[in-house]
Amino acid sequence: MKPWTRAAWLTGALVFGPVLASAQDTNPMDWRSVPEMDDQITMKIGHSVNMEWSSHTATLKRFAELVAIYTHNEIRPEIFPGAQLGGEREMVQQARQGALQVTLPATNNIAALAPSLNVFILPYLATSTEQVNYLQDELTPYLVPRVIEEAGVRIVGWENSGWRAFFYKSDEPIEEPGDLAGLKMRVPPNPIMIASYEAWGGNPTPIAWAELYSALQQGVVEGGDNPVTDVMGMKFDEVINRMTTFHYTILTHPIVVSERWFQGLSEEHQAAVLRAGKEATDYIRWWQPLDEANWWEMAREAGVEITAIEDESEWLEKARAIWPDYYDAIGPDGEVVVNKALEILAQYPGE
């Protein structure tokens, strides 16, 4: 039997815990308790959501632990959740400056600083989770240098939180675009997402995420769209009564690292960060659907009435019609970027 390398030992320690531990015991070592060593490099990680229930948390914990493992503990992670370090755009700016090493912004938020990523926001660009994953894998290498130039950060992986679903308070379900006309719906402050609602005849109202619960409670808006994990995790079921599922866009978050910090690392440490990003992506793609199923069951148990849109053709046709108006939001060569994405999707092996 081959002797364990130091990296392999750390893998066993961090993932499996001591050999004598019971299978029921929780892992005694995680990103919080990686041993301190002299001359460690700090990797400060910031994100905007609650630590306990989100796939953001699962992604960043896995990423942090893998970086520690693959650098032999020479990089020490510190995670700051719950917008402790600022909003998502603010944290991207901090990463550009090198003050923050890693963050996980929503694609629609970082797109304000890295317009190239608006390609992923185009409604109905992809219509299955598998297509989205394939597109991320194949298009990201092309986008990495663009995003570095635009925002000063490097994409090393992805977290997908699930398909955005309508959540709302209404006597009737949303089934057709015309059903949006009587509802004020919260949208993120992203021009493509706002235009999607307008194409459906809706009343989009940009509201900050932190203000949304009170806005729903006070009737400022009747609903919005987010994955079920966010809806239930934020207890929106207390102020809405319905959800409608469809497939216009997945809520995605790139794992981004400060390019200034990345370029200051050794080649070995750079390789470790890139490997950790890929493996954290693979992990969350396995974990997230399992977790999401539990949240849907929780929504049903809470009495939320769930409607599935069976025929999305009208939604798709109206939404895709706005694409040419927003090529410039992707960049001066935005149409070229979109066509590249479509070429990739045309090669998707599942088709």
Image (cartoon, rainbow, N blue to C red):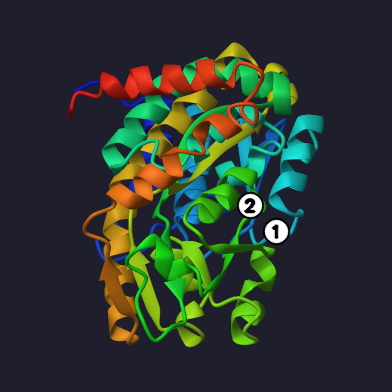
Q: Nearer the viewer, residue 212 or 198?
A: 198
Q: Three-letter amino acid code at disc 2?
A: His
Q: Residue at x 24, y 21 (%)?
A: 2
Q: Amino acid at mark 1?
A: Ala
Please identify the quadrant where the N terminus is shown.
Answer: top left
- Image height of 139 relative to 159, above or below: above
Give the numbered dot on residue 8.
none
Q: Quadrant of residue 206?
A: bottom right
Query: Camera-side residue: 323 or 349?
Result: 323
State the image coordinates of residue 305 (x, y, percent, origin top left): 31, 80
Q: CA distance from mark 2 to mark 1?
A: 6 Å
Residue under label 2, please give it: 47
What element does badge 1 sit on?
loop
Residue that mark 1 sits on: 83
Q: Is residue 30 visible?
A: no
Contact check, label 2 and label 1, Cβ < 8 Å: yes
Question: Residue 279, percent across and down?
Answer: 39, 33
